[in-house]
Image (cartoon, grey):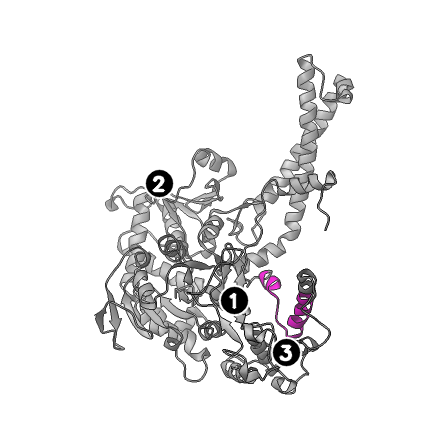
């Protein structure tokens, strides 16, 4: 497909979402140019006369007709001919210039491809940045530095991905948390009331919890742990515990998510309503408000009761029926989302929908979220090669279940052993999907919002590549930007205390040696008289105590712009990562706030993980500079 055709197609895609001709042209050229840096004859009339072709684009031309771009010039690396690159990623899907065209390649202007590649690459990279800027397309590094960037934990070559599977709830569609979880909470509390629990006066408070916290079912606590499992903050019922209380309670134990009888990890936003209800009921249990007729309840038994009440709300179907009747009240529309999936589909990716929701709910919600934003007469089913409802994840990734094809709009089903393109199925297993598509392991990318059900299990059992959707990243990103001044002041005070504390410790050691009749560390320290030594230590001690009084509340307030109780989602303390962030890094190759963020990248993107700093990195660099051993460029 040549440029003019692509432009026409993209203008159709954006009929439902207003877009200027120049923006449509930019969007087209983004997809057209990045397929190959050497674009074909794209003359000024392609841009509909709005502006002349940028000078940089003029020098990137093959001396051939635009319609010949494709199979005659380029080849695509297949699975059978693929290799691995220097980062260990598959080269499948890479574009190659056929050898017979290398000799005929001509480049307009003064540039030449002869000479040292370092110099050529430097010039080309600079000019590419100019061209991207002229086209209004952000380069990958600037996309990364935004709340809607896609962040990479493990290098991922999208070109090598043959199929992309998607979860639905909180992945392909984002619910209004206050509306959806609020109604789930209401149904849960009504069921608790019917069971005899005192729920009068309680209301849904979504700020009470955040994703990534852990419920301690033995103590009736909600805790936030760091990447090692050490508890940094805790709440009993709805009351935050002091730092001292946290230390006394959890100082000698770690959060271990493998002990499921005790610890419950809040994997997803669906956990919010359950956690809020449970912590509020812990208060009622502590106050003796729960009737004895309900039996002797401990915190673990109370958790089970809340879980049963919420489960009934889902099983009985009242909640989903209400949502299906008025989806506009619960779903936040995203016009960019279908366009992102269209890019992927037209790039040759097989698209899969794998959801635990039933057929009727899936169809209703997908129609509402997708159909109005798709071009022409496309429906949401046209996007996906295979749709699987009632998938029963995580078992879908762990074992084999019977698969049924949904053959009527009423949901009538018949058994199937293999999926076909365009089919709609219920149940089955991931291995059935792999066998049906003849695509396996790391050729499949699965995208979901649940760390365990979606991301962890698809990676552990099948070695699929994984992407986590975490909508809260956008709010956290903004909160971190607004917290920069506070954090800079806090770090400055901590650094000051470190310097003052080091002097105090040295003087303390000098005093210790003096008492033992040994010389101090240096001659000057040895010559200090007793009064001078004591006065210096007293002064420094007062300074450190006052610094502590200043630092402690500032440290407690760090992250309150995101959540006043728990701080930032991804951090535990000023510098360390949260347990949630450790799970994300371990199991999600990439993570982002919403699926439509893929629209800001091409389906051919090569995501590279960033350098991971180590504790000794800065010290090593400092020493090399200090000793004059830095490597010259």
Label 1 sits on residue: 597
Residue 301: percent from the left, percent from the top?
29, 45
User: In the structure shown, which secondary structural element does the residue marked by tag 2 occupy?
Assistant: loop
Residue sitting farthest toward the top: 517
Residue 558 rendering spot, x and y as whole percentages: 58, 48
- Element marked by disc 1: helix
Q: How crowded is mark 3: few (under 14 residues within 10 Å), some or many (20 or more)?
A: some
Question: Do the CB atoms of the residues marked 1 and 3 lie less than 8 Å apart?
Answer: no
Q: Are marks 1 and 2 in contact (CB under 8 Å)?
A: no
Res 287 visible: no
Magenta segment: 124-144
Q: Which SS does the magenta portion mostly show?
A: helix
Residue corresponding to mark 3? 61
Asked if residue 126 is among those painted magenta in the image, a careful observer would answer yes
The Cα atoms of the two marked residues, 1 and 2, are separated by: 40 Å
Q: In the rendered image, which residue does mark 2 sit on?
A: 218
Q: Which of marks 1 and 2 is nearer the N terminus?
A: 2
Kind of element beneath mark 3: loop
Give coordinates of residue 90: x percent, y percent. Answer: 47, 60
Residue sitting nearer the eye, 602 or 452 = 602
Seen in the picture, residue 592 relative to 264 is either above or below; the reply is below
Could you say which is closer to the camera, residue 532 or residue 290?
Answer: 532
Q: Is residue 549 visible from the viewing direction of this image? A: yes
User: Does residue 328 lie above or below 15 as drawn?
Assistant: above
N-terminal of the pair, mark 1 or mark 3, is 3
User: Whole-Å distance between the Cαs marked 1 and 3?
Assistant: 30 Å
Dot 2 alpha-carbon crowd within 10 angstroms: few under 14, some 14 to 19, many 20 or more: some
Magenta region includes residue 357: no
Say which of marks 1 and 2 sits in front.
Answer: 1
For the point 44% across and 53% down, the residue is 587
């Amino acid at each position: 497909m040549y440029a003019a055709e692509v432009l026409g197609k993209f203008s159709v895609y954006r009929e439902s979402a207003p877009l200027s001709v120049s923006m449509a042209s930019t969007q087209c050229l983004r997809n057209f140019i990045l397929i190959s840096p050497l674009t074909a004859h794209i003359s000024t009339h392609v841009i509909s006369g709005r502006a002349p072709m940028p000078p940089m684009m003029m020098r990137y031309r093959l001396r051939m007709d635009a319609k010949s771009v494709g199979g005659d010039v380029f080849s695509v690396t297949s699975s059978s001919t693929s290799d691995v690159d220097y980062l260990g990623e598959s080269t499948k899907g890479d574009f190659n210039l056929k050898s017979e065209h290398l000799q005929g390649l001509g480049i307009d202007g003064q540039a030449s491809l002869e000479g040292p590649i370092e110099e050529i690459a430097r010039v080309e990279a600079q000019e590419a940045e100019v061209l991207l800027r002229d086209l209004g397309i952000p380069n990958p590094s600037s996309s990364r530095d935004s709340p809607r960037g896609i962040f990479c934990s493990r290098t991922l070559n999208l070109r090598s991905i043959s199929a992309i599977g998607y979860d639905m709830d909180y992945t392909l569609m984002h619910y209004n948390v206050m509306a959806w979880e609020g109604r789930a909470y209401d149904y849960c509390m009504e069921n608790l009331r019917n069971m005899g629990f005192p729920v009068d006066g309680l209301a849904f408070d979504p700020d009470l919890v955040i994703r990534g916290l852990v419920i301690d079912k033995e103590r009736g606590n909600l805790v936030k742990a760091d990447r090692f499992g050490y508890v940094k903050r805790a709440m009993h019922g709805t009351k935050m515990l002091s730092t001292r209380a946290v230390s006394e309670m959890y100082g000698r134990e770690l959060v271990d998510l493998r002990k499921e009888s005790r610890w419950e990890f809040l994997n997803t936003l669906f956990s919010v309503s359950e956690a809020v209800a449970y912590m509020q009921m812990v208060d009622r249990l502590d106050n003796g408000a729960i009737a004895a007729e309900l039996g002797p309840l401990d915190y673990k038994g109370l958790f089970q009761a809340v879980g049963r009440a919420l489960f009934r709300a889902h099983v009985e179907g009242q909640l989903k029926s209400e949502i299906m009747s008025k989806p506009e009240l619960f779903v936040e529309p995203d016009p960019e989302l279908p366009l992102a999936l269209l890019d992927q589909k037209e790039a040759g990716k097989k698209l899969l929908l794998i959801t635990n929701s039933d057929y009727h709910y899936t169809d209703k919600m997908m129609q509402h979220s997708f159909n109005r934003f798709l071009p022409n007469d496309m429906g949401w089913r046209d996007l996906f090669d295979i749709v699987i409802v009632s998938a029963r994840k995580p078992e879908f990734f762990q074992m084999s279940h019977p698969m049924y094809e949904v053959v009527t709009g009423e949901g009538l089903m018949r058994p199937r052993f293999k999926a076909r393109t365009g089919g709609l199925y219920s149940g089955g297993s991931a291995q059935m999907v792999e066998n049906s598509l003849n695509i396996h392991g790391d050729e499949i990318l699965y995208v979901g919002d649940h760390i365990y059900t979606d991301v962890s299990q698809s990676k552990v059992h099948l070695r699929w590549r994984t992407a986590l959707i975490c909508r809260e990243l956008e709010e956290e990103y903004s909160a971190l930007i607004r917290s920069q001044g506070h954090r800079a002041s806090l770090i400055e005070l901590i650094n000051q205390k470190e310097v003052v504390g080091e002097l105090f410790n040295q003087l303390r050691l000098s005093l210790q040696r003096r008492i033992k009749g040994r010389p101090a560390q240096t001659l000057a320290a040895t010559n200090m008289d007793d009064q001078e030594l004591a006065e210096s230590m007293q002064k420094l001690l007062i300074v450190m105590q006052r610094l502590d009084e200043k630092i402690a509340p500032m440290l407690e307030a760090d992250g309150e712009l995101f959540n006043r109780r728990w701080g930032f989602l991804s951090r535990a303390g000023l510098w360390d990562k949260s347990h949630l962030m450790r799970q994300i890094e371990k199991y999600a190759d990439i993570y982002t706030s919403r699926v439509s963020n893929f629209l800001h990248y091409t389906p051919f993107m090569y995501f590279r993980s960033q350098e991971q700093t180590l504790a000794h990195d800065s010290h090593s660099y400092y020493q090399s500079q200090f000793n004059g051993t830095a490597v010259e460029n």
